[in-house]
Structures are given as structure tokens and as C-alpha cells.
Image: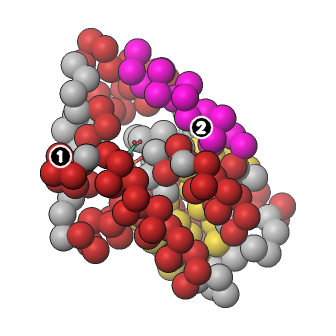
Amino acid sequence: MIISLTGFMGVGKSTLARLLAGSLCCRVIDLDRLVEKEQGKSVAEIFQTYGENYFRKLEEEALKRIISENSERLLIISLGGGTLISENNQKIIKEYTNCIYLRASVNLLTERLASHRGKRPALDSIDDNSLELEVSNLLQKRLRGYENTAKLIIDVDEKSVRSILNEIIAGLDSFSEV
Ligand code: S3P
């Protein structure tokens, strides 16, 4: 069974994926980190040098490969915040994984992203005053992709990492053996 975690940048996908894999004693793959390792460049460098479309191609290829190589195992995948922009990726994730959408308010996301400026190339050109509006616009565009693909939606505002993890674990019962 493959479990994928989706949600906007800064929601905590990578952290929760790692903790979930620890609880379930299985492997975890962070899609951004895998692309970085394969390219020998950070996501920011790939965006800067080759542009976002090129990154999206690498992201989609890596995703397909992970899924085809791991269909028999229990695996957690942490997706990038923009992975589900692609309808093709939505289809793949929906068909071959049990997807969890970590849902956060614009307020929480803006707060977290404001304290991590420089690490998210998709938001780097946005000045601090416009960050909230940009997060809101981007989230609006991506919401349907997250919601339509996920089998489980978990609201994360005002919850500790531990209680989010417990909610995820409690929700695993409803998952199918994909
Ligand atoms: C992106 C999110 C990032 C990374 C890239 C683009 C996006 O992943 O894939 O910087 O467009 O939302 P995280 O959500 O893990 O930060």
C-alpha cells in the first residue's frame, strides 16, 4: 500500500510523512528531495536554471517511477505542494495511492511561509506584503486538485503534530489495498 501526503507548501507534509513512516516502520520518500538527489541540484536551483515547467516534468517522471517500483510495499510519499496541479498526477495518485490532504487555513500557511522565505521558489518573487494574497490565490487554484484526489482530509490548524499523526493513523482503517 502506498500512502501519499498532499497539501500546500508549509503545511508539514515532510515532517508528518517521516513520523508516519516511523510509526508504521516503513520507508518514506520525499518527492522534492528525490528530484534534488537525482539532479544534484536544489529545487530552487532547478527552478532558477531551467524554469518551473522543467521541474514539473522531473517531478512527474520521479512520481511515476516511485509508484511503479513500490506497488508491493508499504510506502509513504510526501508530495510537493504543486504536484497535484497536473491532472495526470491527480489520476496516478488517486488510482495507485491512498492520498491524505493536510488542509490548513491561509492564515496558518502565510505565517509559516513568512518565516521560511527563500526556501520556496514558487513564492520567492512575492514580497512580504503580498504573501497572504498570493497564498490565498494559489491555494484557491489548487484546492480542487487536493480535495478531489484525497481519500482522507485532515484539518491541521491549532493541532499538534502528535494529534495530526494520531488522526492519520486512526484514518488508515478506511484505506484500500492499493
Ligand atoms: C512547490 C512546492 C514545493 C516544491 C517546489 C514547488 C509548489 O514543495 O515542490 O518548490 O509549487 O507548491 P513543498 O510543498 O514540499 O514545499
From the top left corner, tell me how far across and down residue 150 is, in percent.
70, 50
138 in the magenta segment: yes
Task: Write down the region rendered in magenta.
Answer: 133-148
From the top left corner, tell me how far across and down residue 87 is, in percent.
61, 48
Name the quadrant containing residue 122: top left
Labelled disc at residue 128: none
Labelled disc at residue 103: 2
Give me the residue at 59% from left, 44% from top. 102
From the top left corner, tell me how far across and down residue 111 is, in percent.
36, 26
Give me the residue at 44% from left, 52% from top. 80
Side of 175 where 62 appears, left or right: left
The residue beneath circle 1 is 48
Side of 60 where 125 appears, left or right: left
Identify the amino acid type marked 1: Gln
Question: Above or below — where is 145 with respect to 168?
Answer: above
Give me the residue at 33% from left, 20% from top. 131
Give me the residue at 69% from left, 49% from top. 149
Question: Above or below — where is 29 with respect to 158?
Answer: below
Q: Residues within 10 Å of mark 1 (few under 14, many from 20)?
A: few
Q: Is residue 140 visible?
A: yes
Q: Is residue 163 visible?
A: no
Which element type, helix, strand or loop, lies under badge 2?
strand
Identify the amino acid type marked 2: Arg
Question: Above or below — where is 155 with respect to 2?
Answer: above
169 in the magenta segment: no
